[in-house]
Image (cartoon, rainbow, N blue to C red):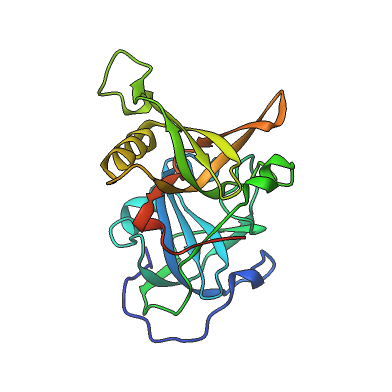
Amino acid sequence: MSSRFTSSSIERYNDFSRLNPAIVGWHVHVKVLRRFHTDDYISKGGLGLLLVDDKGNQIEALICSLLTSHYSTFIEEDEFYTIMNFRVVENSGFTKLTRSDFKIMFYDGTIVKEASSFSQDDYIVATPFGAIFNGYHDTSYLITLIGRVVESSDLTNVTDEPSVIGGYRYSFTIEDQENKTLKCCAYGGVAIECHDRFRNVIGTDVTCVLRWWKVYQLLDGWRHVRIYSHPPYSNILVQSDADNVEHS
């Protein structure tokens, strides 16, 4: 395998907005926002990455299962890298992590190098509740929401075995600054995380950020939508974790 992990000295990079499948030889400078195992049909059993460049553009990267053991040893969340020699493919599927038209695909010639950090605002752009109620949001894209927790349920497991992480469910309702509310449900490990984080916050006024969650439209219309966690992408920030959040 020709990939190597070294410090970076090259300073000319391509923005994600310029990537397309018709050209090869791209060289990008990225921060890893999210790392997860994927069941994508292209890279089933592989590793997925959510990357951001210094312009704030985001793109998903996929690493097939045969290469996962190599790259997983050094690619970490919140770290910076340069990436060369990769394929650019269409961002297709029923659920999309980013609004980019494309994804990045690693192959055995992809070179990843440790890199210096770049200056880029770390705020999270949240989708307004109104955009969801009015039907303006394309449900194929995962979204970020910010709201105050106004109601929550007990943590439950739909199986008879507490050790089955995938069986956990946790429901709660969040409210925005205009007093609009959305009902949310977390599954598996995210359910446990939500329950524990809400419980451990001092005081009763809990503000949270739901990152990369899925909007589902029920039969009775947009005013009765539900927000669900969507493995393996979703996570949650609570109160002080959410200091750098802006609404789009």
| Above or below, comparing residue 6 to residue 98 in the picture | below
In the depicted view, which residue is nearer to us: 120 or 210?
Answer: 210
In the depicted view, which residue is nearer to us: 235 or 71?
Answer: 235
In the depicted view, which residue is nearer to us: 61 or 87?
Answer: 61
The C terminus: image quadrant: bottom right
Tell me residue 95's x, y (percent).
60, 42
Write down the quadrant of residue 224 in the picture.
top right
Tell me residue 46's x, y (percent).
42, 46
Write down the quadrant of residue 74 in the picture.
bottom left
Write down the quadrant of residue 45 in the picture.
top left
Residue at x-position 46% and y-position 70% = 30
Tell me residue 187's x, y (percent).
42, 31
Residue at x-position 57% and y-position 38% = 181
Tell me residue 147's x, y (percent).
50, 47
| Above or below, comparing residue 52 to residue 178 in the picture | below
| Above or below, comparing residue 33 to residue 97 in the picture | below
Residue at x-position 40% and y-position 69% = 112
The N terminus: image quadrant: bottom left
